[in-house]
């Protein structure tokens, strides 16, 4: 009896190893395919990066021409915006009314948590040209 039990045990182990080998073989093939796909994607990314670098070297000439056509580039500094508001003697709500934005947006700009859009930068530039009286007059109109 012990002989049959050991024979069955050995046969079950042999069949189990054979099944496992078949399963792992398909996984190994899939893994190999994935690795080759990843390597191909990495090569494509490297090629795209080289192309982007090459195009960036040529881009500044075109960008300078575009800036001349559009006019001066407007910049934004959070602390400069806060000092502008204080210089004009406006509350954040009043400044928001002048620019057409909310009170919370003004606070976010001043804290540097967000930056105004290009269209809003134009409005800030116009408000910057105003004095206290001009800002008060424009608020009275609105």
Image: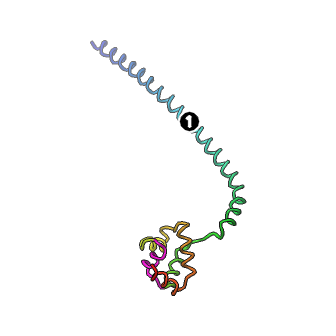
**Left or right relative to 46: residue 114:** left
**Left or right relative to 111: residue 54:** right
Q: Secondary structure at mark 1?
A: helix
Q: Report which quarter residue 123 is drawn in.
A: bottom right
Q: Position of residue 75 (x, y in %)?
A: 59, 71
**Left or right relative to 46: residue 123:** left
Q: Nearer the viewer, residue 80 or 129?
A: 129
Tell me the residue at 56%/76% (across/down).
Answer: 126
Q: Report which quarter residue 35 is drawn in.
A: top right
Q: Is residue 62 above or below residue 7?
A: below
Tell me the residue at 53%/81% (across/down).
Answer: 84
Query: What predominant SS class does the magenta segment belong to?
Result: helix
Looking at the image, the residue that sits furthest to the front is 141
In the picture of the structure, the residue carrying the numbered disc 1 is 37
Tell me the residue at 69%/66% (across/down).
Answer: 68
Q: Is residue 91 magenta?
A: yes
Q: Which residues are magenta?
A: 89-100
Tell me the residue at 47%/29% (across/down).
Answer: 27
Q: Nearer the viewer, residue 95 or 34?
A: 95
Q: Nearer the viewer, residue 46 or 6?
A: 46
Q: Position of residue 104 (x, y in %)?
A: 42, 71
Q: Nearer the viewer, residue 49 or 95?
A: 95
Say which quadrant the C terminus sits in: bottom left
Q: Is residue 46 above or below residue 60?
A: above
Q: Position of residue 25 (x, y in %)?
A: 48, 26
Which color scheme did the rendering employ for the protein? Answer: rainbow
Q: Position of residue 88 (x, y in %)?
A: 50, 84
Say which quadrant the N terminus sits in: top left
Q: Is residue 39 above or below residue 113?
A: above
How packed mark 1 is, by other alpha carbons closer than 10 Å (few <14, some 14-19, many 20 or more), is few
């Amino acid at each position: 009896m012990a002989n049959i039990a050991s024979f069955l045990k050995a046969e079950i182990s042999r069949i189990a190893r054979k099944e496992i080998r078949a399963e792992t073989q398909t996984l190994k093939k899939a893994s190999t395919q994935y690795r080759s796909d990843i390597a191909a994607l990495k090569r494509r990314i490297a090629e795209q990066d080289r192309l982007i670098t090459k195009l960036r070297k040529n881009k500044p000439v075109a960008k300078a021409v575009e800036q001349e056509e559009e006019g001066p580039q407007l910049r934004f500094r959070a602390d400069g915006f806060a000092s502008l508001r204080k210089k004009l003697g406006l509350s954040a709500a009043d400044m928001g009314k002048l620019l057409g934005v909310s009170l919370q947006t003004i606070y976010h700009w001043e804290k540097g948590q967000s930056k105004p859009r290009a269209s809003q930068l134009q409005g800030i530039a116009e408000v910057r040209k105003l004095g206290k009286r001009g800002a008060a007059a424009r608020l009275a109109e609105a």
